[in-house]
Structure formats: structure tokens, C-alpha cells
Image (cartoon, rainbow, N blue to C red):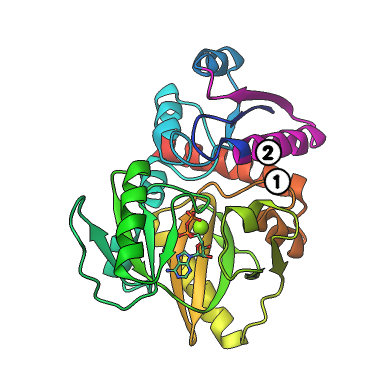
Amino acid sequence: MKIVVLYGGNSPEREVSLLSGKAVGKALRRKGHNILLLDTAKNTFVKNILKASPDCVFVALHGERGEDGIVQGLLETLNIPYTGSGVRASAICMNKIVTKKILTYHKIPTPAFVEVQKDKCPRLPFSFPAVVKPANMGSTIGIKVVHNKKEMLTAIKECFKLDSEVFIEEYIKGTEVTVGILGNQKPELLPVIEIETATGFYDYKAKYTPGGSRHIIPARIDKKIVKKIECIALNTYKILGCSGFARMEIIVRKGTPYVLDVNTIPGMTDTSLLPDAARAKGISFDELCEKIVKLGIERCQKQKKE
Ligand SMILES: Nc1ncnc2c1ncn2[C@@H]1O[C@H](COP(=O)(O)OP(=O)(O)O)[C@@H](O)[C@H]1O
Ligand SMILES: [Mg+2]
């Protein structure tokens, strides 16, 4: 097949996306496909996609203008099949406030939160420590744990420099896990991974420096709780309308799994979390990348029939 891999872009997660794109490109080449890598930071990428006329586009972009439905909308308009979630699920999952509101409506546990109005001091319905977050960022950019009002106000100010939407979340002290899911109509679960970090905070440094975190498969968690995590992850995937693949981030406190974050384009280097989980299930990185492409084409064909 002829496959265009979109990577790079201008989001703060550009560097991670360059790594994901290169790894995916190599994997698909090893599978015998004809691969063209295009960096969306260069605006010639649209012209080059049209010129290539690929069977599918593998979207290996993270963050804004890549993971948020914008590129997905472009590909819909061009009528070219692409990997991962469609426009709506991508847009929903990129915004943590919108995601949390939908999860709350469906009674899926997520940490308690309040939206912050600019230049207003929020009233917290929970006690410190709390976590100040921008609604639309990834890779822990702008996220800060605060222990008192002064720290909170400083963190809010900093956060508004990055994003126009900011919220504060209850700090959940517990075990952090992540669950990868693959599929369209009948999504399948990958093994739950427990994430162990030196600091207890899975931040940019822990994510991207060697030895910054440890992936523990299978998670050292009671089987009954693992079932609960899996059920919540799968429901989250379906409710938000994800397709192809996604990775949920969850913190478990006293047996309750709280959904923190849904990544519709999780890191895709061969040591990233979702590929690690797939490997534990016997799916190699190369097979995983090819499977994601096939799921993208399948979703597009189904959409055309409808
Ligand atoms: N409410 C919370 N309680 C405890 N730790 C949190 C909380 N929110 C975030 N964290 C920590 O910060 C990391 C990044 O937060 P997350 O909401 O997943 O943002 P990102 O989109 O940057 O991945 C999490 O993986 C976790 O380690
Ligand atoms: Mg996260």
C-alpha cells in the first residue's frame, strides 16, 4: 500500500511526534509498504498528500493541529482514509474539560474539577493539594500540583499564558495505570500497564528520559480491580466515539479507577506505552502499525457505505 505518514507539526509536542512518525514509517516500510513522511509544519504537505494519492494517511501527530480533529477534517474533505479517531472524538478528547463533562454525565469516575475564569479566584469543592491544568495541552505541559491558594493563583496565571481554558482538579493519590485499546466497532483491550515514576508524577521528564519511568506489565493490581479498569477504559472509548486506537490514563485510588486523560494519538515509538502493551499481547510494533492502518481504511469504507 501507499501510505503517507504525517508527523512533526507545530504543536509543543513536535519533538515527540517526529519520533513517533519516524518509528511508524520504518515499521510500515519493513512490512513492505511504500511510505512517504510529510511534516505538517511545512504547508506544502497538503499539496504533497494530493500528489501522492495514498491508500491511507497515518496521522502520527500529537497535540493541536494533529490530534484535535483539524487534520482529520482536512483528510475527510480530501476523501482520504486516515488512522485513528474521526473528527468528533479527536476534538472531544483533545479538550480535557469537555471530556470530563461527558464522562461525568455517563457516571465514569474522573477526578472532581472546577473550571477557572480568568482573573477570578476559584472556590475549590475539594481540599489541597490540587492540580492546575490547561484544557488543551498534552505531555504534562503547564500542569502543576499546588498546595495552597498562593501557589494555585500563580499556577493559574501561568496556565492562562498557554491556554484560554484552565481547570483545577482534585489530586488523586494512587496507582497510575494506562490502558491501550485497538479497534473500531469491536474494540479490544491491551494489557493494563502500571506506570512507576521516581516522583509519583508522570511528567515530561519521566515520560521522555530513559529510566524516568517504568512500565510494569501486568500491573501489580488485584484482578477484580483490573477488570474494573478494563471495563471503564472500554466504556470511555465507546462513549467518546474513539476508533482505531487510543490510550487511556487512569489513577486507581482505593479500588476506584479515575480517568485522567484520553490520548487518541498516543506515543508511537517502539518503546512507547501502547506498543509495549501490544507486544505483551503478542502484537509486534510492525504488526501494530499495520493493524492501525487497516482499521483506518475499514472505518473509512464503513463511513462511505452509510
Ligand atoms: N488529578 C491528578 N492527581 C494526581 N496526579 C495527576 C493528576 N492529574 C495529572 N496527574 C499526573 O500528571 C500526569 C499528566 O497529566 P494528564 O492529565 O494526563 O495530562 P497530559 O495530557 O499532559 O498527559 C499524569 O500522568 C499524572 O502522573
Ligand atoms: Mg496524560
Q: Amino acid at mark 1?
A: Thr
Which of the 4 image quadrants contains residue 61?
Answer: top right
Query: Seen in the image, is 131 located left or right of residue 173?
Result: left
Is 239 situated above or below 231?
Answer: above
Query: Seen in the image, is 197 located left or right of residue 134?
Result: right
Residue 289 image point, x, y percent: 68, 44
Q: Amino acid at mark 2?
A: Leu
Category of crowding for the residue at label 2, using alpha-carbon neighbours closer than 10 angstroms: few (below 14), some (14–19), many (at least 20): some
Residue 279 image point, x, y percent: 75, 59
Q: Residue at x 42, y 30 (%)?
A: 76
Residue 242 image point, x, y percent: 45, 52
Which of the 4 image quadrants contains residue 5?
Answer: top right
Location of mark 2 (residue): 19
Q: Quadrant of the N terminus?
A: top right
Q: Residue at x 44, y 56 (%)?
A: 143
Q: Which residues are magenta?
A: 16-42
Category of crowding for the residue at label 1, using alpha-carbon neighbours closer than 10 angstroms: few (below 14), some (14–19), many (at least 20): many
Location of mark 1 (residue): 269
